[in-house]
Structures are given as C-alpha cells and as structure tokens.
Amino acid sequence: MEKQTTRESYDLHTHTQASDGMNKPAENVRLAKEKGLTGLAITDHDTVAGIAEAQLAGKELGVDVVPGIEISTRAGGRDIHVLGYFLDLEDERLLERLARLRSVREERNGLIIAKLQQLGLAITLEEVKAGLTRPLRPDESLGRPHIADVLVRKGYVSDMREAFDRYLAEGKPGYASLPRIAPEEAIAWIREAGGSPVLAHPGLYGDDELVRSILEHGKPDGIEVYHSDHGPEEELRYAAMAEQYGLIVTGGSDYHGVRQGVVFHGELGGRTAPPGTLERLKQAASAARIEEN
C-alpha cells in the first residue's frame, strides 16, 4: 500500500491485545505511522482498555488515535457487532455495562472449550490464557482467535482460517453463543456515553434484511461500507444503503495482527474511511453529548 500523505487517511477498525488482537496498542499506532496513515481507531471488543496507551503513542508519533469500541450483540440468530467512536472513556455506566459483556464472553469461551473437548481436541482454557504470555487484565477479554491460536499450535489445524472454518465460525461444531444485548441497545449505550454508533461489517451477516431492520430500528449514525471482507459488490450495495438511510460511510481493516504468519482479517490500513468521515463522526458524537445533557 502506498503511503498517503496528501489527504486524510484513517483506518477506523483495529484490534489490540486488550481484546483479541496480537499487538500492543502502541504497535498498531507505529504500524499506522509506517503506512502513512493520518490516524486509526482502536476498537477492541467490549473494552476501552487499550486506548490510553495508543493515544500516548499517537502523541509521540504524530498519529491521530480515535477512541473506539466494538460491542458484541445478537439479533436474528446471528452475532452482530456495533462500532462506537468518540465515547467518554470514563463514563461509569458504560464501563459497568462493558464489564457485564466481558463476563458473558468469558462464559462463552468456556462453552467453546467444552465443545472442542467433546470433539476429542485436548485443549483447556488455561492453555488459551497461557498463550498470552502475560496476565490478563480485568478490563481485557479473550476471544475465538486466542482459542484458534492454541488449535494451530497443537497441530489440530494448519492455520487460523482452518480453525474458524472447521470449528469456531458460526454454525461450526465448536461454536457457542449466549444471550446478548440487541444491536439497538448497544447503539443506545454508545450514544448515552457521548459516542457515535456504526454498524460493523454488514456483509459478514449474510442477511441484508436483518441489516435493514437494524438500521431502521436502531438508527445508527453510520455503516461500515469498506472492510477487509467486503468485495466490490458489497461496497456498492452498502454504499447505496448508506445513501438510502442517510448514514455516514466508514471503513477499516478489522486488523487483528499476525498469527502463525496469517493476517486476520486484513492488513492495517488495507481499508480506510472516505475523506471527511472523521468530522462527520465527531459531529454526531457532539450531538449525542448535547442530547444526553
């Protein structure tokens, strides 16, 4: 990817060790600098734990770090993710809500491990945690990529993609899900914390009627049109949907780092938001704060 220095370039979807990414937050910022990005968002699953470190690195390197999150929800029998930007990171109500979500994620991890054991795979939650090579903080969380990492290291699968395709993806024998909040509730939480909510990677849900229902009932500010797992057809389709519903068009790589030589989902900076997106998200977040006050 060529360095982009003549106009703003933001990757608005990246993960760190605070959830299921491989890199420390500061490393994501360093990569953004290396790739010539104006900035990036840290959007870890159900936690804001990695943002402070990233923002400190951003100040040192001259990279704009957008405070973000990706909240796990469920609708229509599918896992749905809602991104949030410019939230108040010290909002006590939000932090309490996120802690509850992480406890559900921890319980789900236990169910996944149990299913894998029933399939004859010798894997334990202790092994998954040991793979971090560091203590897991209370405001951090484990995810399926951590479990997939152990499956690869133990030789049950050849790489991360096979781990998901055979065992961990939705509908596969090792998949597990627990009751979660609805997307509409996550959208409300983000606004109540002074942020701007965006529906993440709609193309991954395989159900555009469900996507439309979420947009109509939840009324997020934006939709992630540009994503590493969206092809040209999806980009055109969701850009048209954004225009129809008057939504902000966003974009990001969903970068999780490199595991066993495989980048998951895409390279940092491989997808970016259109120029002007950041200002529109800021304005929407400002409107949410005014409404809350």
Image (spheres, rainbow, N blue to C red):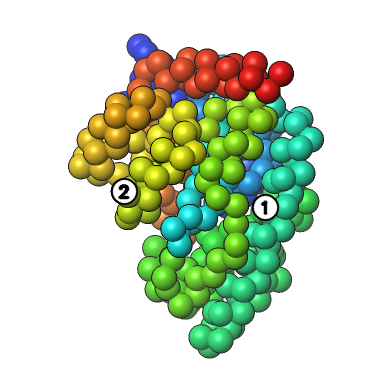
Quadrant of residue 95 in the image?
top right
Give the x, y percent position of residue 35.
42, 28
Residue 235 versus residue 151: which sits nearer the camera? 235
Q: In the structure shown, which secondary structural element does the residue marked by tag 1 occupy?
A: helix
Q: Is residue 87 above or below residue 202?
A: above
Callout 2, which amino acid?
Asp
Q: Which of marks 2 and 1 is nearer the N terminus?
A: 1
- Assign the N terminus to one quadrant of the image: top left
Crowding at mark 2 (Cα within 10 Å: few <14, some 14-19, many 20+): some
- Assign the C terminus to one quadrant of the image: top right
Quadrant of residue 143 in the image?
bottom right
Tell me what residue is drawn at x 67 percent, y 30 percent: 193
Callout 1, which amino acid?
Leu
Q: Which residue lies furthest to the front in this view?
A: 217
Q: In this view, does 199 lie above or below 163?
A: above
Mark pair 2, 1: CA separation:
26 Å
Residue 237 is labelled as: none
Residue 101 is labelled as: 1
Residue 14 versus residue 291: which sits nearer the camera? 291
Residue receiving disc 2 = 208
Q: Is residue 282 visible from the viewing direction of this image? A: no
Tell me what residue is drawn at x 76 percent, y 37 percent: 93
Q: Which of marks 2 and 1 is in front?
A: 2
Q: Residue furthest top?
A: 6
